[in-house]
């Protein structure tokens, strides 16, 4: 694929206005000024720049009493796109998302057994090329996001010994993908991409939450204080490798009795209700540690048996968390189904170029 050669918003005020505009169908200067704290004059300048860049369009005039009518604007979702990919242990899911994070296309491709980085890049390159042609993305395509099985180093863009993937030792996947695709790439853990998607969809009330994914393994993306939390080494989220049974079976990580392997043994034995209870116990342990108020369940294993898992986790949260009257926790299913990780990876790319990032976030798109 050829490089898009497209610049990104670097001005904080521009990113702030785009972030606010994403949450409403239309807006005028006064609404943006009230929501952002910027002066009307500053808002006018920002809107003029965004209009010139093709991200915003004037659609109407609105009169508020006497005086000059206000111009009504709208964000143009189709002005920018990103491709998001979810590398799972058996499949590659690829989506296209627009400027507001809406998924406009989604495909899933099988991956060969014991697949290599080259195999992933071959399929991703071919599918990204196809989607770019089908949707006429051209210069509107700003980059590619990849949500990948961990452990991985987000800052360096390197996959570190991904669990159950034999050929993924210290693979510089971000660098390899950028060279192959000719586009900026963000590489993040699958669960962090997933929780980013939920945050985009659910809005500012989604401040302290956990995205628990069960899909050939268990992981957890954390959204704390309104931002993705990756930890000191960017490897937060290895939730499935909390030990819950000291004398339990051997896990792929080398320890015994991890949540991941205890859950999987229950599934293999055909005891799905026990598997769901195991997950519920693990989630209560997580709540006791980090005190979030929203848990989102996701992953193909959960999506196939939503009622069993949702009931078990809700029951555990209701009966095992001390003082549920004081520490209420909402438990929901993902709002994006099987697309959650790939969509979140695309949203990370859009946000890196056309949105607000936490001050501590590394400059993932360079």
Image (tube, grey):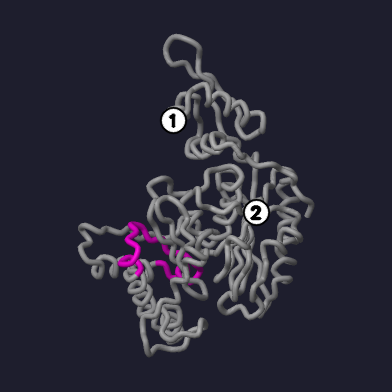
Q: What residue sits 48% from the left and 84% below the top?
A: 251
Q: What residue sits 34% from the left and 76% below the top?
A: 277
Q: What stretch is highlighted in magenta?
A: 286-306
Verify whether residue 294 appears in magenta.
yes
Q: Residue 322 vs residue 150: left or right?
A: left
Query: How many residues crowd mark 1 within 10 Å: few (<14), some (14–19), many (20+)?
Result: few
Q: Which mark is residue 83?
A: 2
Tell me the quadrant of the picture where the N terminus can be found.
Answer: bottom right
Q: What secondary structure is found at the residue carrying circle 2?
A: strand
Residue that label 1 marks: 37
Query: How many residues crowd mark 2 within 10 Å: few (<14), some (14–19), many (20+)?
Result: many
Q: Where is residue 17 in the image (x, y as percent from the top left)?
A: 52, 34
The answer to which of 224 and 196 lies nearer the viewer is: 224
Tell me which label, 2 or 1, sits earlier in the chain.
1
Q: What secondary structure is found at the residue carrying circle 1?
A: loop
Tell me if residue 131 comes above or below residue 52 in the rendering.
below
Q: What residue sits 34% from the left and 59% below the top?
A: 292
Marks 2 and 1 in Cβ contact (< 8 Å) = no
Q: What residue sits 49% from the left and 61% below the top?
A: 230
Q: Position of residue 246 (x, y in %)?
A: 37, 87
Q: Where is residue 262 in the image (x, y as percent from the top left)?
A: 41, 83
Question: Furthest-top residue in view?
Answer: 66
């Amino acid at each position: 694929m050829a490089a898009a050669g497209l610049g990104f918003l670097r001005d904080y005020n521009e990113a702030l206005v785009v972030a606010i505009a994403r949450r409403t169908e239309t807006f005028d200067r006064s609404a943006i000024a009230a929501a952002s704290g910027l002066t009307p004059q500053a808002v006018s300048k920002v809107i003029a720049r965004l209009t010139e860049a093709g991200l915003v369009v004037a659609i109407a005039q609105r009169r508020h009493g006497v005086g000059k009518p206000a111009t009504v604007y709208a964000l143009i979702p189709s002005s920018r796109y990103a491709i998001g990919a979810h590398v799972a242990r058996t499949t590659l899911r690829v989506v296209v998302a627009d400027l507001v994070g809406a998924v406009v296309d989604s495909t899933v491709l099988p991956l060969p057994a014991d697949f290599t980085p080259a195999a992933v890049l071959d399929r991703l390159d071919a599918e990204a090329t196809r989607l770019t042609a089908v949707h006429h993305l051209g210069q509107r395509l700003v980059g590619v996001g990849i949500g990948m099985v961990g452990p991985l180093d987000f800052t360096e863009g390197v996959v570190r010994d991904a669990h159950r993937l034999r050929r993924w030792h210290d693979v510089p996947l971000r660098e390899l993908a950028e060279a192959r695709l000719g586009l900026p790439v963000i590489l993040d853990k699958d669960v962090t991409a997933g929780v980013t998607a939920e945050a985009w969809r659910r809005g500012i009330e989604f401040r302290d939450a956990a995205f628990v994914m069960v899909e050939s393994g268990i992981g957890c993306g954390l959204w704390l204080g309104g931002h993705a939390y990756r930890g000191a080494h960017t490897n937060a989220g290895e939730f499935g490798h909390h030990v819950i049974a000291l004398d339990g079976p051997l896990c792929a990580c080398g320890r015994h009795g991890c949540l991941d392997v205890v859950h999987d043994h229950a599934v293999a034995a055909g005891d799905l209700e026990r598997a769901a209870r195991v997950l519920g116990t693990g989630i209560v342990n997580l709540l006791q540690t980090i005190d979030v108020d929203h848990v989102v369940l996701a992953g193909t294993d959960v999506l196939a048996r939503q009622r069993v898992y949702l009931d078990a986790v809700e029951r555990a949260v209701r009966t095992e968390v001390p003082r549920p009257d004081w520490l209420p926790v909402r438990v929901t299913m993902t709002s994006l189904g099987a697309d959650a990780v790939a969509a979140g990876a695309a949203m990370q790319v859009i946000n890196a170029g056309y949105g607000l990032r936490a001050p501590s976030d590394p400059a993932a798109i360079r």
